[in-house]
Amino acid sequence: MFLILVEFKHAFPVLNLQLRRPSWLVVFVFLLENRTKKTLGVSNKGKRVSLNTSNLSHIPLSESKGLISLLNVIKVHETRSHSHPNAEEDKVMTRKQKAENKAHEAEQSPKKPKSEGDNGHANGKSSEDIVAEFEKVCTAVKDNLSTEQMREILEANGQDSSGSDANVLRKCQDLLFYGPLDKCPACNGNLEFTGIRYSCTGSYSEWASCTYSTKDPPRKQEPIKLPDSILNSPASDLIKKYEDPSRRPRKVLSIPDKPFTGMLVSLMGRLSTSHQYWRKEIEKHGGKVANHVIGVTCLIASPAEREQGGSSKLAEAMEGGIPVVSEAWLKDSIEKQEPQPLEAYDIVTDLAPDGKGIPWDKMDPNVEALESLSAELKLYGKRGVHKDTKLQERGGKIFEKDGILYNCAFSRCDLGKKLNDYSVMQLISVPESNLNLYYKKGKVGDDPNAEERLEEWENVEAAVKEFVRLFEEVTGNEFEPWEREEKIQKKPLKFYPIDMDDGVDVRHGGLGLHQLGVAATHCKLEPLVANFMKVLCSQEIYKYALMEMGYDPPELPMGMLSDAHLKRCEEVLQKFVETLKSMKDTGPKAKAVWSDFSQRWFTLMHSTRPFIFKDFQELADNAAAALETIRDITVASHLIGDMGGSTLDDPLSERYNKMGCSISPLDKESDDYKMILKYLETTYEPVKVGDVEYKVSVDNIFVVESSVCPSVDEIKKLPNKVLLWCGTQSSNLLRHLHRGFLPAICSLPVPGYMFGKAIVCSDAAAEATRYGFTAVDRPEGFLVLAVASLGDEITEIKSPPEDTKSLEEKKVGVKGLGRKKTDESEHFVWQDDIKVPCGRLVPSDNKDGILEYNEYAMYDPKQVSIRFLVGVKYEEENAVMEPE
């Protein structure tokens, strides 16, 4: 595997980049301020590579801004990082990657047993015989029946007769040979043959279309009804042969699909294989080849054609909006027996003046990650003028009347209809100009194909009336009840509002990369504290967190959502968890419940890559933990505000004072520092991924005195006090310091959520570092040491409790027993009566437990006090670099 080594020509002291998927790798050289970093981070679908850079002295370390420069190509061993504490697997990937890997692994319909004949084939016939019979019927239907007759047949048998002539032909041929389709087993909707699969056209609810899809659908066991007009057709005798259900053959699933069915393809220029070869392959797989361009599905061309200026054929395709794709589209579609998305193979639309025009969900995820991290946020909050209007440059502001800000954002995710888009509408007042109405609808990354309009209105009342009309058209609801009382009812296939708060998303308001050094230099805080605040006030840690989860659209302010919207998301999640606990259905009915929730969720929380949740771990990673992170980022956004102005006014000190807690470096010679160092070293185990282990070293330790957490003296008055480790991402840390710890958002039978709505800590630093560890290309992280009271009564559990509500109500302390424990003979007491469970990690008696290390759950935030922040650096060992 080859890595492209590139250098960003300015510092990235807080950037944590994780790319996705193995199609290509990018190495980023991060130029730290002291230039002492010796490893480079590389990502390949969650897999990390570390390179020793001591022998790369030839790389210029330019401090000037500029574009990415190509430096070298190197072959290395793959390693993996970003560990997650899952007891059942060592697989280490981002949340989004786990979801992508599991999505669509199996057909949604259970396999039906085939009836076997004497020769071992379905229905006593060989696959070749069935294929030949089917082709014979298809030819007879096509040659002898009109489209109107085919529609009559479909209607007589309760099937959908709408669609193009080609679609009607396919549906009729399938019906006459295999029998009429029965209802969808998931939602009781109608199934429809699409040429490759049978998909449902129904819906689960107003939020979600049915996503049931199969190659072996249920069929009605009744005779085919033939209209009188068909009985005199030359094909009637052949058609009648399959009228009786007992004589119909079963569909042979092993027959390769024809991915180009109904498609017209044009070929251009020199390809890797001859036009004649591709013509045969395309026709063999159901398509046709045309010499012209107008009206074709796509134009196949070599990337070299665009470099050479192309031909009239290429120009004609671009002018007509016809996709121009590489040969890889043909190869991959044939290999996967399914047409691949044309956008992912595009080779020309980046020549368009307004961008590449490929939705992020169709991009290679590596490219998407780069797009996300480099993208400028276009809408930062309720008062933010959309960047694409360019009216902010003229002093434009969101129009406000009678307490209403005329600025709305919307989301729609309907996976059954393959919809995942956003919409934005604003009224913008510009000094010495008319009122402007801005409207945009599209998919993230696909600006060239977005529906967009910017209009001046002389009459204010007319502009407001048009805004209200658009709102009702987009949502199916009235505008005023939504804005004043947040009353709204989701309508099928309509958008739902993303309720923005009045503030500035930290991806816009936080410190940019070029501001970090200056801000820290002019800060009056103690230098170590100033550097700590610099990290927490940077845009980059929040950009990375949202990118890694897939909630990173630049069109929507996902870091500035209202409390009401976040509460709505929490209620939807908790209701779904309760539904799962009481659900007895299995098979398609159960999958329908998961699908319905997934589409609701990704409408409320717009993602660039929505998918259908399939298990509790995915739900924990991509819904519960994601909602907690977005909630915490929203708090950070409010506290940080807009730091886009001068950094000479010491904005870091101002944010430090707003945070409401005191942070001071701990003396490295103090007993407390040595105690914490011992506690960390004794209870830490390297995260082993493949052949690589990650050790951890301490940079600095800070003492925390928070105004929102109980003081250590207050905790000392409570029983059973313990000093425990808590892991956290840097993007969540500012909220913890400003507001204190919050209990988990829901109860799920997986680590981190198995105790219900509790604050969870551990006596093993090894557990906490997994949550704080992200990637070797940004090795710095933070661990929290908190003093916790477990109360008068401590309940020990070995497996997830069936019901956590009683624990939550009683607020008892809970100790979840892990497969490893700290050696109790080495424990000691700190500050008179606070237990420090510092001891070597040894096997426990709970060998089959879900937890690897002991975890402690507290249900009252008043029982937990953040006492220390431990700044750590993760160091990768045993990485090997091989020469070419």
Image: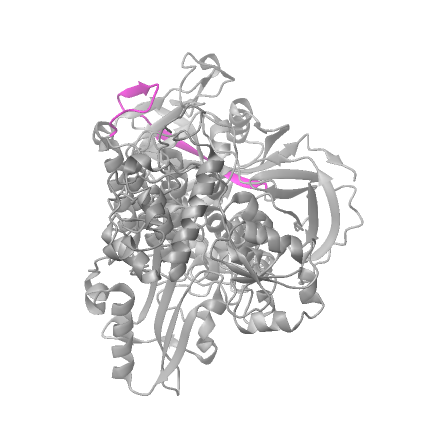
Residue at left offset 45%, top offset 65% = 378
**Image point 42% across, 54% down: which residue?**
657
Relative side of 408 to 309, left or right: left
State the scheme by which the image is colored: one colour
Q: Is residue 875 left or right of residue 452?
A: right
- Looking at the image, residue 325 lies above or below residue 25: below
Q: Is residue 21 visible?
A: yes
Provide the residue span drawn in magenta: 779-804
**Residue at screen point 44% across, 47% down:** 136
Q: Is 399 inside the magenta-drawn segment? A: no
Describe residue 753's horizontal placement relative to residue 100 as left or right.
left
Total numbered badges shown on the rendered structure: 0
Q: Residue at x 39, y 87 (%)?
A: 433
Q: Nearer the viewer, residue 498 or 808?
A: 498
Quarter placement of the C terminus: top right
- Residue 57, percent across and down? 79, 47
Image height check: is 877 above or below 397?
above
Q: Give the x, y percent position of residue 779.
A: 59, 41
Which corner quadrant of the image does residue 412 belong to? bottom left
Find residue 750 and report its horizontal and vertical position in percent. 37, 30
Residue 793 lies in the magenta stretch: yes
Residue 557, visible in the rendered structure:
no
Q: Quadrant of the N terminus?
A: top right
Horizontal and vertical percent for residue 13?
60, 50
Q: Is residue 738 above or below residue 427?
A: above
